């Protein structure tokens, strides 16, 4: 088992298919498949159920996933520190941002940049603005009411306003 094989394994998990994973790690699909096969042989288990459309984790694959991700991140971190070239971004997240949104943003970034370490800092809007100004965070994920001048919307979220009425609760959907 080597770091490259674990990288291929994580790419398949994050991408869902061998073809997409190969594209994301910049190798051919046969090269990626051979790496996964060698990893499975070294572990003496099957990690994926291979289907025509998607690769899903077997029970052994599910057990291997978290330790593999932790080991890969730790080894990559060590490698970066030894090179004195850490690839890390610090993301400030506004306290009222739903973490599902943050997770999907990180997942999308990780698919194309699997070696970048991501550190999250959750804080209120004033603290985030201060950290951005002091350059202790690389970027912030906040809503447009945070009061920063340069922002890019990442998603639209539907909100619901619920108010009491004479005949019961009334609901009105709002899109922001």
Image (cartoon, rainbow, N blue to C red):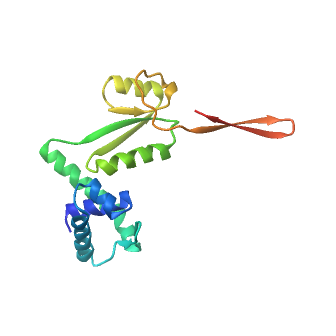
Q: Residue 143 at what x, y percent from top left?
A: 50, 31
Q: Position of residue 149 (x, y in %)?
A: 42, 20
Residue 128: give x, y in percent of width and height: 41, 28
Residue at the (33%, 62%) spot, across then down? 12
x and y percent of residue 88 in the render? 27, 41
**In this orientation, does residue 174 appear?**
yes
Q: Nearer the viewer, residue 148 or 136?
A: 148
Residue 11 falls left or right of residue 26: right
- Residue at x 32% of width, y 62% of height: 19
Residue under the point 47% across and 21% down: 147
Total number of numbered labels?
A: 0
Quadrant location of the C terminus in the rendered image: top right
> Residue 151 falls in which quadrant of the image?
top left
Q: Is residue 18 above or below residue 87?
A: below
Question: Between 132 and 56, which is closer to the camera in this rendering?
Answer: 56
From what the image shows, is residue 150 above or below residue 97?
above
The answer to whether residue 106 is above or below residue 52 is above
Figure quadrant of residue 70: bottom left
Whether residue 132 sits left or right of residue 41 in the image: it is right
Question: Furthest-left residue in view?
Answer: 83
In this view, the residue farthest toward the bottom is 44
The residue positioned 44% from the left and 43% from the top of the image is 102
Whether residue 11 is visible to the viewer of this picture, yes or no, is no
Q: Is residue 13 above or below residue 126?
A: below
Question: Viewer-proximal residue, 76 or 17?
Answer: 17
Question: Quarter of the image containing the N terminus?
Answer: bottom left
Q: In the image, is 113 to the left or to the right of 2?
A: right
């Amino acid at each position: 088992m080597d770091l490259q094989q674990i990288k291929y394994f994580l790419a398949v998990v994050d991408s869902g298919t061998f073809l997409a994973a190969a594209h994301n790690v910049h190798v051919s699909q046969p090269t990626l498949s051979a790496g996964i096969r060698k990893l499975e042989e070294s572990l003496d288990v099957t990690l994926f159920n291979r289907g025509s459309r998607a690769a899903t984790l077997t029970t052994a694959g599910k057990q291997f996933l978290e330790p593999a991700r932790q080991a890969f991140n730790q080894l990559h971190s060590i490698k970066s520190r030894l090179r004195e070239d850490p690839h890390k971004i610090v993301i400030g997240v506004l306290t009222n941002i739903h973490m599902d949104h943050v997770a999907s943003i990180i997942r999308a970034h990780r698919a194309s940049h699997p070696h970048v370490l991501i550190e999250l800092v959750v804080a209120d809007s004033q603290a985030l603005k201060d950290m951005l100004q002091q350059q202790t965070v690389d970027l912030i994920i906040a809503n447009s009411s945070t009061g920063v001048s340069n922002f890019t919307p990442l998603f639209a979220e539907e909100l619901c306003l619920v108010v009491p009425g004479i005949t019961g609760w009334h609901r009105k959907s709002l899109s922001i």
